Image (cartoon, rainbow, N blue to C red):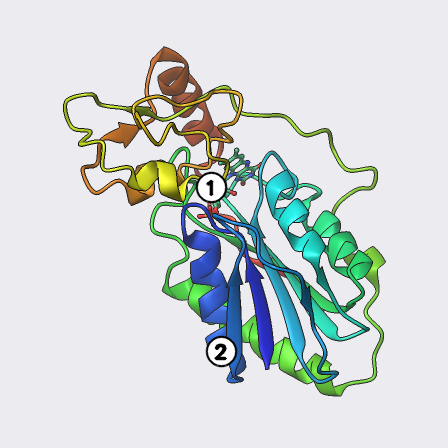
Amino acid sequence: MIHSFVFSPSGTSRKVADIFTKAMGMDFKTHDLTVHGIGSIYVKDTDDLVVFVAPVYAGRVPALAAERLEVVSGHGQKAVAIAVYGNRDYDDALVEMCDIISARGFNLIAAGAFIAQHCIFPKVANDRPDSSDEKKIAEFASLVSARIISDKRFDLKTVKGNRPYKKTVGVPLQPKADKKRCSSCGICAAQCPTEAIDAADPRRTDAKKCITCCRCINVCPQEARSLGGLLYKVAGWKFCKDNSRRLEPEWFV
Ligand SMILES: Cc1cc2nc3c(=O)[nH]c(=O)nc-3n(C[C@H](O)[C@H](O)[C@H](O)COP(=O)(O)O)c2cc1C
């Protein structure tokens, strides 16, 4: 049985997690860490495989994802780290994920970094993961399956990334609601991972709480929420220009 712990505000990490777990061909349970924390989970069965999937934010694991995984623990079960990033770089996020999983009591056997559409600048890696990524995720799954039955020790030092990790930085952009389109249905407020949107008036967002995860943009049935403004346009133009080359998945097994 696979326990898949997934943090995925805009849905692409979940997509990668689902492709991976299906390719493994085992029963699986997905624990969604995105909107709310989960109750404490102790993985009992020695034969279970644990998978942690999260996006890369500024080259790191999103702090909220790390915090929400703190209630999960095990006793040496095999585990896999999967970082999903928007075609810029995953920097230190994958080593950080490996460290988080090891600290929860699991025995890391593989780590992979996969590319998905950038949630802030969706022209970058648009429509990824695509069919080529799906094949590579399946290839990674078959290597993980082989690893499960082998006695070879996984060398954490082979994973790309640095310790100490790079400093976290926030993104100075927040999605805004178009006042005419917004019907105040409250779906964005209910689905916001950080409760940054006022449930009584969803047109108001607390900039201090917002992590720019873009979930509100993706769940709004009226397509009323978006990023915009001069900074977004200028930064977006440069970001798209600098990150238009196609990166490919990488793994360490
Ligand atoms: C605040 C923030 C920071 C990000 N930083 C990076 C980054 O450092 N490198 C990168 O390639 N993509 C970065 N991204 C893009 C996400 O990693 C990418 O869109 C990912 O697929 C989002 O996962 P999700 O759909 O599961 O939420 C960032 C996204 C956000 C919201």
Question: Marks 2 and 1: in contact by CB < 8 Å?
Answer: no
With 78 as the anchor, is 121 left or right in this view? left
Question: Which residue lies at the image location 81% right of the left edge and 65% below the top edge?
Answer: 105
Quarter containing the N terminus: bottom right
Quarter of the figure with residue 71: bottom right
Q: Residues within 10 Å of mark 1 (few under 14, many from 20)?
A: few
With 213 as the anchor, is 76 left or right in this view? right
Q: Secondary structure at mark 1?
A: loop
The residue where tag 2 is placed is 23
- Residue toward you, 14 or 129: 14
Relative height, residue 19 to residue 61 (above, below): below
Inter-mark Cα distance, 1 to 2 = 27 Å
Question: Which residue lies at the image location 75% right of the left edge and 45% below the top edge?
Answer: 161
Q: Secondary structure at mark 2?
A: helix
The residue where tag 1 is placed is 245
Dot 2 amino acid type:
Ala
Query: How far from the left and from the top, in percent, is residue 152?
Result: 83, 79
Relative height, residue 241 to residue 34 (above, below): above
- The residue positioned farthest toward the bottom in the image shown: 149
Question: Which residue lies at the image location 53% right of the left edge and 21% below the top edge?
Answer: 208
Relative height, residue 20 to residue 199 (above, below): below
The answer to whether one can see residue 191 in this image is yes
- The residue positioned farthest toward the front in the image shown: 200
Dot 1 amino acid type:
Arg
Relative height, residue 149 to residue 132 (above, below): below
Quarter containing the C terminus: bottom right
Query: How far from the left and from the top, in percent, is residue 14?
Result: 46, 59
Question: Which residue lies at the image location 64% right of the left edge and 77% below the top edge?
Answer: 143
Quarter of the figure with residue 114: bottom right
Whichever of labels 1 and 2 marks the residue nearer the N terminus, that label is 2
